[in-house]
Each structure stands twice: as C-alpha cells, then as structure tokens.
Image (cartoon, rainbow, N blue to C red):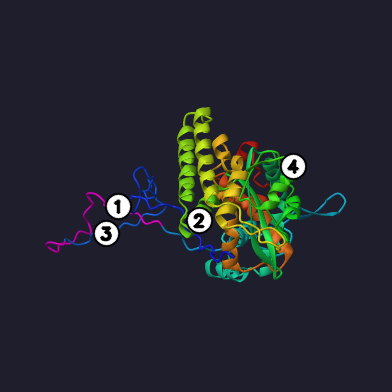
C-alpha cells in the first residue's frame, strides 16, 4: 500500500522581482481637489504673528486651500404621501387620488432602505442581526429581520427574468467554466454549482454533487461549446460538449509528484505546460491560433515526457489470488489521466478562447466559503435558493461594470439589469 499522502495545497505562484507598492503605469487613487466644494470655511488671520497688531479689518491677499472629504451626518427622510379626497359637486360621490404603487401601508420603509438590506446580506454577507445593527448605528432605525427576508425574497423574484437570460446566454456561449463547492443547508451537506464566463454567473444549490444536479441546472444538458472544469468525472457524462481541463490542478498534482516521489518528468511537464501558455499568451496579441509546426512541436514534447514518465511507472503486477483492480501509484494515475485526456489538457493551445485554468469558476464559488464563514449556514432551502438567485444577478452586474446597489434597487422596482448577448463571450 502506498503510504504517501498529498501535502497541504501549495501556492503555485512564483515569487516576483517587483518592489512593494504601486507599479509603474499603475493608475493611482489619490484624492484630487474639486473645483466647487460643497462648503467653504474661512479661517481668519486676526493678529500678526510678528508684531501682534490686529488684522481684523485687513483684506486677505490670498488663500491657502485644503479640502476635507467626509460623509455628512446621515438621517432618514420621511416623505408623507397625501391622497386628495374630493366630493363631486354633481353627484356628491367621494373620490380619492391613487397612491404610488409601491406605497401600500400607512407606515413603511422605502426602496432605498430595502435595497441596502439586500446589498448587505447578499453582497457583503452581513448576518441578519448585524444588518439591524448597521441600520440602527448609521440611520437610527432598526428594520426587523422579517423586513430583510421579505426584501430578499422580492429581489430574488424580480431578478428571475435576468437569471433566465443569463442561463440562455451561457447555453449559447462558446466557452463556459463549471465548478461546485460544498455548503450546508438545514444542517445537511449540499452543493453550490456554478456556470460562468468573464461576463456571466449562474448558481444553483442542490443536495447532490454529480449529474443529477448538473441536469437540474439545465445548462450542460443543452450546451455544445467548450466546458472548462476540473476533471470531476460526472462532467464527462455530457458527450456533446468539448471538454477542457484545468491546468492549475495539473500543475499542483505535478508539483506533488515531483516533490514527494522525486520524479523529474513531472517538473518537465509542468514547464512544458507553462511554456505553451507563454507562447499562447504572446501569440494571441497578433493572431488567432498557433501555426501547425509550433503545435506539433509542443505535442511531441508533451508525448515524450509522458512516455518517459510511464517507463518509470509501469503498471503494477496483480498478486495471485487477489480480486479486483490493482491499485496504482499517484504518479501512474496522473500519467494515465494526462495521456488519455491530452486534447482536453491542451485545449487552450488549440483554441485561444479556452483559458489555461478554471480560475474563473473557482473565483465565482469561492465567495460561498467566505459567506459561510461570515454569516453561517443556510437555515432553509428556500433561503439558499434566494441567495443564489440574487448572488448570480449581482455577480453578473459587477462583471459588466454596473453599480451593484443601483442594480438591486432597479430589480426591486421591477426593472432588473438584463445582460446582452455579447457579455457571454
């Protein structure tokens, strides 16, 4: 039995030679003075600092100016809506004007407070009780947890048209990243599944991790583009898609084999993958594909390294009388996977639209771990679904450069941000 266990994940980023702080060409964020400040405070020079004479009646020759940017005291405004009631002089009927459609109670919070509650819970991951603390500390009012939950439910309902469009755009996109991560709902392990591009994000929560959940998401079953993922086997059930595998995972696995088994082929293959990536990154600046000779050269290099690794790791011999498959070593398993899925591993070399790794999807699911650390697990399945609907909408809004709080407020008014077809590319 192989006693070696994988070590803790190791960062793959190599140390750079850049100095600390902002780099050359970096656009700074330094405050710049404004031409027309909101307020001006004049500080009077009332006495000469040399001789002590009074200067109260002397006009200033000039001013030295300093500007302070600050937030004014925040106070909730109360708007009273009054609907006129009039008696018809002809028939004596009493007539009352209509209130705005969003003014439904004698006393209520407005749309901006509702949008802020949704923003706090779904974008900043603030727990319900602390949302109340925030409003009380900043605005002097404390909305109930029920108010925040109702605002989230309304927002999730109103962003459904946007999420439907996001889903359709992903189905028709050329390349989509897929990933999943565990989360707890009602005390049980569930899975957050994501399908995303640089411009789109779509989430679902499901009790299962595999094909049943992927079918429920409804994207892979209708997708015929390039699916980038991390080699989780249920993805391969979808045979109408072109599969591309995450090379960040491969680099980590190769580093493990090199360090723990001291096999040089793993380091050579890591360098091969990085050299191909460098070549692709440079080439895409001026053309759409590598020339056939370059591709052939890299393929031959890849194959030669794999064959050398296989010579070092022959198939294990089956012991007489033992049933079942013979357990292979991690290096042999990795070699078989890389050889058997060569085109999927090198998909980024053949198609410049395919990324080198699955970092896009991994970034899009990472927020769930952060959310659970801050706010805890989901108490209800409905709450998890509401969060996914809002979070996918917010993520897409953010990716497209729109203001998140404004987009939430638009959604609560029934006019959510709807992405266009170009953002899925």
Residue 257's mark?
2
Outermost residue toward the left? 51
Give the spatial CA distance, label 3 vs label 4. Answer: 73 Å
Q: Is residue 14 left or right of residue 399?
A: left
Give the number of the mark in front: 1 or 3. 1
Above or below residue 62? Residue 169 is above
Residue 44's mark?
3
Residue 353 visible in the current orientation = yes
Q: Position of residue 243 (x, y in %)?
A: 65, 43
Sequence-wise first label, 3 or 4: 3
Give the number of the mark in front: 4 or 2. 2
Residue 272 within the magenta-colored segment of the rendering: no
Above or below residue 135? Residue 11 is above
Give the number of the mark in front: 1 or 2. 2
For the record, the magenta segment spans: 49-69
Q: Which residue is mark 4?
A: 222
Residue 56 within the magenta-colored segment of the rendering: yes
Q: Position of residue 5 (x, y in %)?
A: 54, 64
Give the spatial CA distance, label 2 vs label 3. Answer: 74 Å
Dot 2 lies on which element?
helix
Give the spatial CA distance, label 4 vs label 2. Answer: 37 Å
Give the number of the mark in front: 4 or 1. 4
Above or below residue 57? Residue 291 is above
Q: Which residue is mark 1?
A: 65
Give the spatial CA distance, label 1 vs label 2. Answer: 63 Å
Give the spatial CA distance, label 4 vs label 1. Answer: 63 Å
Magenta stretch, overall SS: loop
């Amino acid at each position: 039995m192989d006693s070696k266990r994988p070590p803790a994940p190791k960062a793959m980023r190599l140390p750079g030679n850049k100095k600390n702080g902002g780099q050359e060409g970096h656009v700074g964020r330094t405050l710049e003075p404004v031409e027309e400040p909101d307020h001006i405070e004049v500080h009077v020079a009332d006495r000469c600092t040399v001789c002590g004479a009074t200067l109260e009646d002397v006009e200033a020759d000039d001013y030295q100016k300093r500007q302070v940017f600050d937030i004014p005291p925040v106070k909730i405004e109360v708007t009273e809506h009054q609907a006129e009631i009039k008696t018809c002089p002809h028939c004596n009927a009493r007539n009352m004007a209509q209130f705005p459609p969003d003014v439904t109670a004698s006393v209520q919070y407005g749309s901006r407070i509702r949008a802020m509650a949704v923003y706090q819970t779904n974008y900043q991951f603030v727990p319900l009780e602390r949302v109340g603390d925030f409003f009380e500390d900043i605005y002097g009012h404390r909305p109930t947890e029920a108010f925040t939950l109702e605002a989230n439910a309304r927002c999730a309902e109103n962003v459904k048209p946007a999420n439907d469009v996001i889903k359709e755009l992903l189905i028709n996109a050329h390349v989509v990243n897929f990933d999943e991560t565990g989360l707890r709902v009602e005390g049980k392990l569930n899975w957050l599944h994501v399908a995303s591009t640089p411009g789109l994000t779509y989430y679902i929560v499901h009790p299962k991790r595999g094909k049943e959940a992927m079918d429920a998401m409804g994207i892979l079953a209708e997708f015929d583009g390039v699916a980038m993922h991390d080699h989780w086997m249920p993805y391969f059930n979808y045979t109408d898609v072109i599969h591309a595998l995450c090379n960040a995972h491969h680099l980590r696995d190769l580093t493990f084999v090199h360090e723990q088994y001291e096999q040089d082929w793993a380091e050579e293959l890591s360098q091969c993958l990085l050299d191909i990536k460098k070549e692709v990154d440079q080439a895409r600046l001026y053309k759409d594909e590598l020339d056939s000779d370059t591709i052939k050269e890299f393929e031959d290099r890849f194959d030669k390294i794999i064959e050398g690794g296989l010579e070092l790791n022959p198939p294990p011999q089956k012991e007489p009388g033992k049933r079942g498959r013979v357990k292979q070593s991690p290096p042999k398993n990795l070699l078989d996977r890389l050889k058997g899925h060569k085109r999927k591993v090198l998909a980024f070399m053949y198609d410049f639209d395919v990324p080198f790794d699955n970092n896009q999807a991994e970034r899009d699911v990472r927020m769930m771990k952060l959310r659970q650390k801050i706010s805890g697990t989901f108490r209800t399945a409905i709450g998890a679904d509401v969060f996914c609907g809002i979070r996918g909408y917010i993520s897409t809004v953010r990716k497209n450069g729109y203001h998140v709080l404004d987009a939430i407020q638009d959604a609560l008014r029934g006019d959510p941000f709807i992405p266009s077809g170009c953002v899925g590319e």
